[in-house]
Image: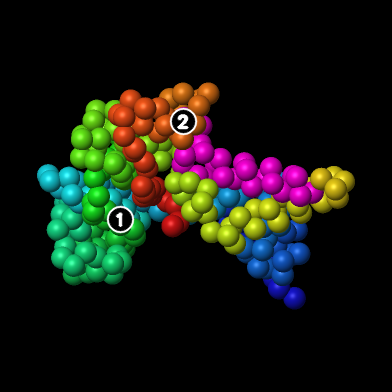
Amino acid sequence: MTVITSDLVGRLRAKTGAGLMDCKRALTASGGDFEKAVQTLREQGAASAAKRSGRVTGAGLVLARLDPSGQTAVLIELTCETDYVARTDDFKALLDELLQKALTASPPWSSPADAPQASLQQMAAKLGENIVLKRFARFDRQKPGIFFAYVHPSESVKVGALVEVGAASDRAAAAPETAELAKVIAMQAAANGARWVRPEEVPADVVEKEKSIGREKAKNEGKPEKIWDKIAEGNLKKFLQDFCLLEQSDNLNPKGSLRRRVEETVKKVGEPVEVRRFARFKVGEDE
């Protein structure tokens, strides 16, 4: 028989926000399988696990840099064990070094392992903490468009986003309305934690999982079987609104969506513009 430890229950509670007894029951039912317990709690409506699934402990900084030509941009998350170390000049200097090397590396880094490990190890020895280049994103512009990076200025919230807004021409890319759109998109991506730009990008297995969770939740709540599929579709729609950037409510205009903001920008510019991609890193969250 699998032993359900208090540490495992605590981890599940931290990840889902569900009650201690609910967490213990879910772990017992899953035979100690952590991910199955998370799904069980979501199906029971006892957790908002999709939004909390990235929470882990950690300290560090997120920072972005764009090259002067506007052709390349990078976003980096450098982590350590304590906020004290993250605030030191040495740690910030290392982050600055890594940003510059990620920006100019040729060929581009393909993973964090491509970073200069000697620099990381030397700083870890100097500061007495484990230091890890956890994530990085590098965007190289191939078509007309612009990059915009936003890093939240708060000391307590360390999150940043890098966005590429594409345009039909260099003229459209240079329009002030396009720049404003890129700024708003980057700020919203940082604040709201989307995973994809649009619903078409969501993997099929994720779509089916969300539908399944909706059906199970309806079943557990005693809803008539004939409406389970309808509830499942509603659950999926809510999921897409939460995690697809263009489906989210516009933070600056809650009555509209970001999709509508893009459409309005297209009208003002007079040519197509689109959100091509984004990256978002928050210290303390998993990938």
* Residue 97 x, y percent position in the rendering: 15, 55
Q: In this view of the protein, which residue sits in the foreground, 140 or 137?
A: 140
Q: Position of residue 98 (x, y in %)?
A: 19, 57
Which residue is the extreme one toward the bottom?
Answer: 1
The secondary element bearing badge 2 is classed as helix
* Residue denoted by label 2: 260
The x and y percentages for residue 287 are 44, 57
Q: Amino acid at mark 2?
A: Arg
Give the mark toward the camera: 1 or 2: 2
Q: Quadrant of residue 234?
A: top right
Which residue is pictured at 62% across the width and 41% down the height? 238
Magenta stretch: includes residue 213: no
Residue stretch in magenta: 228-250
User: Contact, CB < 8 Å: mark 1 with mark 2?
Assistant: no
- The residue to which callout 1 is attached is 137
On the question of residue 152 being in view, the answer is: no
